[in-house]
Image (spheres, grey):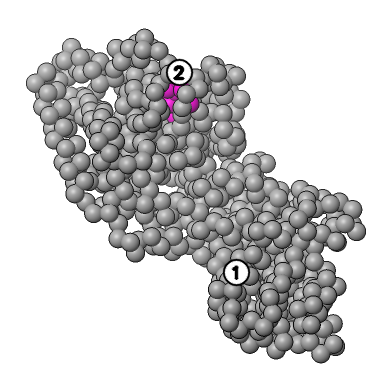
Amino acid sequence: MREITYRQALNEALDEEMARDEKVFLMGEDIAIYGGAYGVTIGLLNKYGEERVKDTPISEAAIVGTGLGSALLGYRPVVEIMYIDFIGLCMDQLNNQVAKIRYMFGGKCTVPLTIRTEGGAGRTLGAHHSQSLEAWLMHIPGIKVVMPSTPADAKGLLKSSIRDDNPVVFIEHKMLYNTKGQVPENEYLIPIGNADVKKTGTDITILTYSRMTLFSLKAAEILEKEGINVEVVDLRTLLPLDKTTIKNSVMKTNRAVIVEEDTRTAGAGAEIGMTVMEECFDYLDAPIKRIAGADVPMPKAPNLESLAIPSVESIVEGIREVMK
Amino acid sequence: MYKPSKQEAAKLLRQMMEIRQFEDKIMELLSKNIAEGGSHLYAGMEAVAVGVISSLNPDDFISSTHRGHGHAIAKDGDLNALMAEILGKKTGVCKGKGGSLHLADLNKGNLGANGIVAGGLGIATGAGIALKMQKSSKIVVCFFGDGALNNGITHECMNMASLWKLPVLYLCENNLYAMSVSINRACSVKDFKKRAEAYDMPAEIADGMDVLAVKEAAIRWIDYVRKGNGPCLLVCNTYRYYGHSRSDPRVYRTKEEEKFYKDRDPILNFAQKCVKEGWLTEKEIKDIEASVTEAIEKATDFAIKSPLPDPEELYTDLYV
C-alpha cells in the first residue's frame, strides 16, 4: 500500500469531500492562498475557488459563529482554528451556540459543522501555541471530539466528521503532519466513536490518543524486550469514548495506564480513568496510572518542553512501576 | 410617511397588540408563579419587531435576542406554541427544551432567540454567507440590542459581512439600557451610526416608537440589502416598559423618563393615527383588541393545560 503523510491524508479527505458534496466549503485564517499554517489546505483554492475556500479575517468567534449559521441553512462548513490555543476566542460560540442549538430548539435543526484545529507541544512554540485542550471540549455535550494519530485514521475520520450531521471538533497534532503511514487508495471511512487497538498485548493496557499513541507504541517495543506485553488502545475519539473497546482490553490485561499529553489535573485521563473504574473495577489487578503532561503553562526552553509532556522513557518507567 | 392600506394597518396594529398582551400576560403568570424562571419582556418595543418583520418576505430570515418574544410573534410565530415554550411544555415550539431565551422556528425563518448578548450575530452573519453562496434573493435581519454593540463578535461579524457584501441587515434595538447600564455609561461612541462607518456600511437611525417610521426605513434598507449592496445598520431608538427582567426594580432610570416614553406608546399612537387617517374606525380597533385578548387567553389556557415533556426527552435531540 502507498505511504503518505498525515498532512496529505487530511488534504485528500478535504479534497474528496469537496468534490463529492458541493455543500462542503472551507473557512479559516490563511487557509486559501497560503494553504493553512500547517499546509493542510494547499491546492484547494486553485481547485475549488475562493467561494468555497475562504480566507477570513482574524476573527475566531465569527469563524465558528458564521460556520454555525451557514450549517443551519444546509451547508457543511469545515472551519479551521489555526491553533487550539485560540479556541478560547470562540469558546462561547462553540459551547453556547454550536453545541446546544439543536437541543435547545427541540431537535428542529442539525449542525453539520466540522471545526479543524491542531494542538500539542514539540516545536518549542511556548505557552500560546502548544497546548492540549481536549478536556475542555470533552466537557461539552452536543459536540464530538476526534483526535487521530495516523495518516489513515486522519483521513477516514475527517471524511466521517464532514459527513456527520453533528458538530465535530477535529484536533490534529502539529508533530504528526510530517509522519508517514499506509493509506488506502480506495475511498474509505472510519466511524467516529471507535477506538483502535494499535498493538495487541496481554499484560497491560495503554489507553491513549493522538501523538502519544506513537510514543506508547515505542515504549511497548522497549517493554516487549523486558517481557512485558503491552496492548496499545488508540482511542481516536474522545467524545464519545468507546467504552466497549476500553472494557474489552482492560478485562483482558487487568491493568490500565493512561498516556495523555494534556495537563494532568482534570485532564482527559481523569475521565478515561473513571470510565475504567465504572466499567471494569473488578477486573483491575493494580491501580490505574496516569502518565500526563505537567500542570504548567508550556515553557519555551526545549528541555523544559520535553519534560512537560510524557516521553517514551517516562511511559516505560510508568509501566514498569505498575507491573511491579 | 409610509401609508399602509386598511388591511395592512389592521395587521400592524394586531401584531403589536398581540405582543403587548402576550408580554403583559407573561408578567401576570410570573407574578402568580405560574410561569417559573425569568423572562425578558418586549413591551414598549413592539413597533420595531412589527415594523421591520412586516416589511420582510415570509421566507426571509431573522435572528433574535434574549428579549425575543416580539420577534417570534412578528415572524408568524404560533401563539400557543410560543406560550407553551415559555412555560417549558411539551407542546412548545422547541418541545419545552428552550424556553423564553431560545424561542426559534427555522421553518418560519426564525433562527432563534439567544441567551447570550450578541449570540445571534454569528448565526445571522453565517446565514448571510449561506444565502450569498446560494445566490438567493433572501436576506437576514440580525436583531440585537445596544448592549451587543460592545461585544467583540459584533465587530468581527460586521467587518466580515461588509468585506464579503453579505445580505444582512443589522438591526440595533437601542432601548438605552444594557440591563441597568445606560448607553451613556457604556458606549464611548454615542452616535451609533459611526459604528457602521467603521465598517464602511451605511446606517440610519429611526424612531423605534413609531411603527410607520420603522417601516419606512426598513423597507428602504431591506431593498438595499436584497439588491446585493451588502450589509447596513438600522438603529431603532426605543424603550422597554418593564425592567430588564422580573426582579429588576428599575433604580437606574426615572419615573419621568418612563412617562416620556409611555406617552409616545407605539400602540396607542398608531391606533389614534389609524382613526385620524381614516384607516380604521374606533369600533374596528376595539374589535381587533378583543380578538387579540381572546387569542392570548386561548394560548395561555393551551400552555397551562399542556403537559411537561416526557422524562425520556432528557437525552433526545442532543445528537442526530
Q: For the point 62% across and 55% down, which residue is it?
A: A136
Residue B232: percent from left, percent from top:
50, 29
Q: Secondary structure at mark 1?
A: helix
Host chain of mark 1: A
Residue B53, located in which quarter of the rendered image? top left
Q: Which residue is mark 1?
A: A274
Q: Which mark is nearer the camera, 1 or 2?
A: 1
**Residue found at the very far left of the displayed protein:** B283
* Number of dots carrying numbers: 2
Q: Which residue is mark 2?
A: B252
**Residue in front for this viewpoint, B86 or B188:** B86
Compared with B221, A159 (above or below) is: below
Residue A260 shows in the view? yes
What segment carries the magenta color?
B171-178
Task: Find out whether residue B251 is within the magenta segment.
Answer: no
Host chain of mark 2: B
Q: For the point 60% across and 74% down, which residue is it?
A: A276
In what quadrant of the picture does the C terminus of chain B appear?
Answer: bottom left
Residue A16: percent from left, percent from top:
60, 67
Q: CA distance from mark 1 to mark 2?
A: 50 Å
**Residue type at mark 2?**
Tyr
User: What is the chief secondary structure element of the magenta stretch?
Assistant: strand
**Residue type at mark 1?**
Met
Could you tell whether A70 is left or right of A33 in the image?
A: left
Compared with A180, B180 (above or below) is: above
For label 1, the crowd category at 10 Å Cα-Cα, with few meaning under 14, some 14 to 19 and many 20 or more, is few
